[in-house]
Image (cartoon, coloured by chain):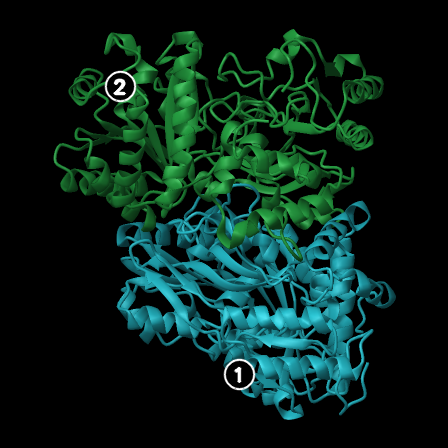
Chain colours: A green, B cyan
Amino acid sequence: MSEVGTRPVPPGLTESDVQRAIDRLTSELGPEKVLTSEAELREFRDPFQVQTSDDFTASAVVMPTTVEEIQAVVAIANETKVPLWTHGQGRNNGYGGPAPRVSGSIIVSLRNMNRVLEINEKLGYAVVEPGVRWFDLYEAIKAGGHRLMVSIADLGWGSVIGNSLDNGATYMPYGVDQASWCGMEVVLANGEVMRTGMGAMPGNKTWHLYKRSLGPSADLMFTQSNFGIVTKMGYWLMPEPETYMPLWLRLWNDDDLATATDVMRELMLDDTLRMNPQIMSGTLLAAVMSDRKAHWDDPNTPIPDDVLDTIARELQTGRWIMRFALYGDEVVVDHRFAKIKNAFESAIPGAEVWGAKYAPDQIADIGDPSERVQGGVPSLDLNAMTGWYGGEQGGHIGFSPVLPMTGQDAIAVRDLMRSEMEAAGLDYMAALIPINARSMIHVTMVLFDTASVEQSERAYAACRRVVVEAAKLGYGEYRAHLDFMDLAAEQYSFGDHDQRRFNETIKDALDPNGILSPGKQSIWPAHMRELRASTNGAVV
Amino acid sequence: MSEVGTRPVPPGLTESDVQRAIDRLTSELGPEKVLTSEAELREFRDPFQVQTSDDFTASAVVMPTTVEEIQAVVAIANETKVPLWTHGQGRNNGYGGPAPRVSGSIIVSLRNMNRVLEINEKLGYAVVEPGVRWFDLYEAIKAGGHRLMVSIADLGWGSVIGNSLDNGATYMPYGVDQASWCGMEVVLANGEVMRTGMGAMPGNKTWHLYKRSLGPSADLMFTQSNFGIVTKMGYWLMPEPETYMPLWLRLWNDDDLATATDVMRELMLDDTLRMNPQIMSGTLLAAVMSDRKAHWDDPNTPIPDDVLDTIARELQTGRWIMRFALYGDEVVVDHRFAKIKNAFESAIPGAEVWGAKYAPDQIADIGDPSERVQGGVPSLDLNAMTGWYGGEQGGHIGFSPVLPMTGQDAIAVRDLMRSEMEAAGLDYMAALIPINARSMIHVTMVLFDTASVEQSERAYAACRRVVVEAAKLGYGEYRAHLDFMDLAAEQYSFGDHDQRRFNETIKDALDPNGILSPGKQSIWPAHMRELRASTNGAVV
């Protein structure tokens, strides 16, 4: 751990090693692409970190704009042994933001590699660089006059490639099983440029159309990984449907979640509903719409049930509210809407399902941001929830285990999370997001005030605890916060951790100097492996 | 190459090495699980090989029945350095059958690991061992009274896991993007048992429900690969729909293929059609229904166009005929059928679309095997096509490039294949199988009489030639025949073959002795790599 104010240095290296790397980068790429001042680096820290901590601090940020520059950066890292940490946009909020696992790493920010390289309307796909945001891809589709839609994440500032590589959720039909990607280009640790799948054949016409390779298919080895730097990705786009119908389901009782989950599973399994809904606790939607202080004074005690019921009624959020949508020919949408409405309302007393139909041209003008997101129109409106505690100083951690899509599992995870959060004096807030008809991610939104070191520390401690408690019940995280990467991976211990050993065997073979994102998802290069062992999930 | 009658020996080893391996296997597993007689081994050769060739010949076959026995087999291979070659059922007809790439390898046949370990009706999945055939899984579903359907391949004798790992096509909605798999168990070359995805967490509830891992997702690294021996796989099952409607589209002109492909793409992109159709040349269906001699005498000249037109009319196959199907609520099926029928019939003069609706209980009694296959009911009926030349001695090679789903590409590949096959004196026969809305596989069925060495050699030579010619046009094989594995992989040369180098770097790290299926899809262990270099696609 470095002193505040001095440049952090990765373990085993010296300040002059880091300086040499920065000098080499500056000379290769030009000074305007290498950031080193404290003010510039501040933007690349975890925005919600405990304010007294200086963990996860980069020594510099390099912003290449071409594949060749990335190759040069990789060569310099191999030469100087200073590790890199890559992001597309770095909008990884709730999971550590753009910050590196190993302090002193040089961040490779691909924010300026932001070209939409191709949009193919006939075959329905785009090819993007890693800095391309949802905003950028959406704008490129509109600017080209294409009748195509892109399945997006909640916040428009995120990177298409970055979100895809972190297995992030998107909500339209192609978001099911996170299946929008097709065909990548990757700079490996040895500097070679590899194309995955059919892209390995020069001039092949199906690189972004067919997902497998002749031989093993490596694409998903680059998700949540440190095996390469992805520089291009094909992303499938859906033709505009005749009708788009965003829907809501509102539930008034906390335990209605169980039946709603079971009904939803059946509707997804029989293909009546093909997209990724989001079941939000009433408080989560309340956090978008309002300020906590309006409902409950004490920031250090959780809001009690009777007040939660009052909020549910006053803001008309219900105790749970699900956003979802139908896409297709109007006659099919009408049939499905009637079926869905009947299924939920007949199974759950008091449940309500409603929605309205839109033509594709009308989606951008819909008032509700959730309804726009599911229609592929990006914004930052949903970021408002982070201000629940602390307003502009508000922050959050995402704790996100995967569970079977059954009512029983939904209740078990809710109960665990609610009791752990409330024991820490925090409100329980959650979004349950199906990723397919069989499983969903319970995103526990652990909101806190970053200006309160005490509350922040309570939030972090609660998250550390639930990593272990959830695993005991058979639920594992789909994506881990920087602070808990080792601890989360520690739970995946089958065969004395042979999945991790498999990954690290590959890591050592592909990246013998360990220069690419060491520690990412607890994959450590050989010479840093003791950092995991000695810390067991705590920071370096 | 070994002399006929003597036991083949892998390069670099001696007969006594092989004998030692066989002795060790016999002592560990028992003599009944180790096959060595010439008569027994004959069943494990490529059934359609040129009859004078003794390439691809195993020295023995071992048939373990447990994961522990597979671990013992791997340990013996590491000890003796005698390589293994794995199959589930080995029904890899058209691509080399069960035979090993390197003569003298010991085949690990998993035919007797044939337990259906679990069927979960609520969440819609099965867990199977690698010897489980489509027949077995279908029967297990029926025996358990489950209202579930399994997306199957054309021939019921195939292994569920084997077909999945070879990226084989199945036809129901879950066959789109070959997406039925979820969660595997694998014995690695070092003998460790790894579970992929969420299975790496002991007791995790979503191993067969959620496809990604925390960290990199390795599952698809085991497709068409020699990185491990898959011992268990989750396979998703679809709830029975209200209505099943198998459909046919018949086209009378050879060039109608272009428009039909474009119409189909639009219907698949807008989700009107969600499954994998099969567009067969009229001759292919004729080969199932009839004998070539009934139409054309000379086995060494291709059937000319006017006779093809006569066959098309007499057998009512058309020049092209597409089988496909709808699944879902009856009102949705009705809407989609009307839309589909109108789309094809209005775009293509003379085209006809027809079909009939069935309840799930009626599918097993449908007379037409294509209509049963798309409804998940396995048989061997479609194997009849192999008898086109030579009856029971008939054989075939599958040459199967992937192409964009456009009419222009369909015609380009048809023209290449037809001209090359006819130049070799063979009939052009094909099945074009969409794998998603954007790409399809052109399975060229190269039929010949295995009793004719001369005709067999012509067929093999033609296939070798088109591997290269198709690649020049930008079309690469999705799956390569044993005889052309090196040549097919040779075409994937981007970055001086860095996809192959990436795979071989991983191969060397995971399997330093090179014991698992050396040469599979041209991934060679370090000590055998010169076999590829020296042969460039010819056999060892």
Can you give x and y, in whole percent of width and height, for residue B534 in the image?
87, 66
Can you give x and y, in whole percent of width and height, for residue B501 in the image?
77, 51
Q: Which mark is residue A383?
A: none
The residue that appears at 59% across and 32% down in the rendered structure is: A161
Q: Chain of mark 1?
A: B
- A313, A98: nearer the viewer: A98
Q: Mark 1 vs mark 2: give the one in front.
A: 2
Q: Badge 2 is on which residue?
A: A302
Rounded to the nearest whole Å, what is the CA distance between mark 1 and mark 2? Answer: 76 Å
| Left or right of residue A176: residue A346 | left
Q: Is residue A287 visible?
A: yes
The answer to whether marks 1 and 2 sit on the same chain is no
Q: Chain of mark 2?
A: A
- B264, A28: nearer the viewer: A28
| Left or right of residue B423: residue A393 | left
Give, as a three-letter code, the residue at label 2.
Answer: Pro
Q: Badge 1 is on which residue?
A: B290
Can you give x and y, in whole percent of width and height, for residue B69 in the image?
54, 73
| Left or right of residue A449: residue B440 | right
The residue that appears at 69% across and 27% down in the rendered structure is: A11
Please tell me whether residue B11 is drawn above or below residue A447 in the rendered image.
below
- B363, B338: nearer the viewer: B363
Please tell me whether residue A433 is drawn above or below residue A386 in the rendered image.
below
Residue lying farthest to the right in this orientation: B534
Name the secondary structure under disc 2.
loop
Q: Is residue A119 visible?
A: no
Q: Quadrant of residue B522?
A: bottom right
Name the secondary structure under disc 1.
loop
